[in-house]
Amino acid sequence: MATIHVPLPVPTHPNAQPPSELTGKAKQEYDRVFAHFANPEYCLPGIPSEKSSKLMEEECMWLSYECILRYIRAAKHDVVLAIKRIEDTLKWRRDFGIYDILTAELVEPEAVTGKEFLFGYDTCGRPGLYMCPSKQNTEEGPRQIQFVVWILERAIDLMGPGVETLALMINFADKAKNSSISTARTVLNILQSHYPERLGVSLIAHLPWLLHAFFKLITPLIDPLTRTKMIFNPVQDDRGLWRSAEARAKGESDDPKEPNARLFELDQLVHDGWGGTQMFAYDHDTYWPVLVEMCEKRREDMVRMWRKLGGVVGIKEWDVKVGLRDEKADEEKPLVLEETSQND
């Protein structure tokens, strides 16, 4: 198979299911949070200027139906806490520079060795975010953390209809340089505070016994739900990548207790370090501009579709993404018909 140097396109997943309709208490919780932020008079508290305390368009789009539900679940259905957590994240996103400071140009020096890259999608359609600690190329500092956040935002760009989480792939093959406890704590705090319900699974491969001590040190910093999503040394065979040998055996017998026992099909998995059939090799000059352009185009299209759907708080990510999918399918129909008539 030929070597590939670019990310794979977003899968359409036509069988993905839309969000279920809310009823009873769940609907009451959502309605309360939605009404708080959808109020035309709403101002973000703690912002001195009334003009700057109004929500920006980017923030209204970020406050989607699914986003509100993610924060309600993360707050264990405490509506007051969910509102506070959303407001804390709105302020953090401004302070961190998500919409202005955090650019591809800023973080590119961190990306040149391919220590973090996006490639492929798991069996649930979640984008694979690969981390290769052995390819660390810079000293610890704010830009390393900015790069983690930037590439996480790009993973969100590449989530298809019905997909809200990512698959984190950490490969400790070769000699890897550990992050400090302070850096690990900062990143974990950002992920758990400002990206709740975004981690679908975390696969950790080739973990040497020396690094078990590091994980023991940071494990108390990880919330219990996240810990359940960590899978060490998943099993690969000629049919895919599995949670474990035991999960593979149960999954093959269609055991309902082992959903998604197979995590990746081989054609969505890189070969190096993971055993997939994709002969991916990170070449920065080829990969980086393609990823940046792909994500910028998809964000522009999603903003356009969001505006078309009303451009307000509470629009469903599902509706935006399905709208784009269907739009693309309609554009491709004439091409398919033309090719068919030429072949007749």
Image (cartoon, helix red, strand yellow):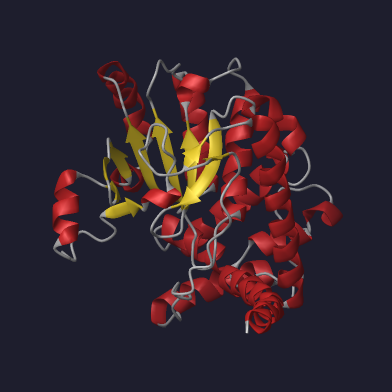
At x 55% / y 62%, what residue is drawn? 67
Residue 87 drawn above or below residue 302: above
Q: Position of residue 130 (x, y in %)?
A: 48, 37
Outermost residue, front direction?
Answer: 344
Q: Residue 12: x and y, percent?
A: 53, 67
Residue in front for this viewpoint, 21 or 276:
276
Residue 16 occupies quadrant? bottom left
Q: Quadrant of residue 95?
A: top right
Above or below: residue 257 compared with residue 134: below
Instruction: Return the x and y of residue 235 as percentages of the image width and height.
Output: 25, 41
The answer to which of 91 and 17 lies nearer the viewer is: 17
Question: Could you tell me how many numbered marks the image carries?
Answer: 0
Q: Taking 242 as reference, is 57 left or right?
A: right
Rendered-image quadrant of the C terminus: bottom right
**Position above or below: 45 against 116:** below
Q: Is residue 75 visible?
A: no
Q: Position of residue 343 (x, y in %)?
A: 63, 79
Residue at left offset 25%, top offset 19%:
209
The residue that appears at 69% across and 25% down in the rendered structure is 109
**Residue depicted at 59% across the width and 18% down the height:** 137
Position above or below: 120 against 212:
below
Using the rendered image of the protein, determine whether residue 212 is visible from the camera's viewpoint: yes
Q: Indicate the quadrant where residue 15 lies.
A: bottom left
Q: Nearer the viewer, residue 206 or 228?
A: 206
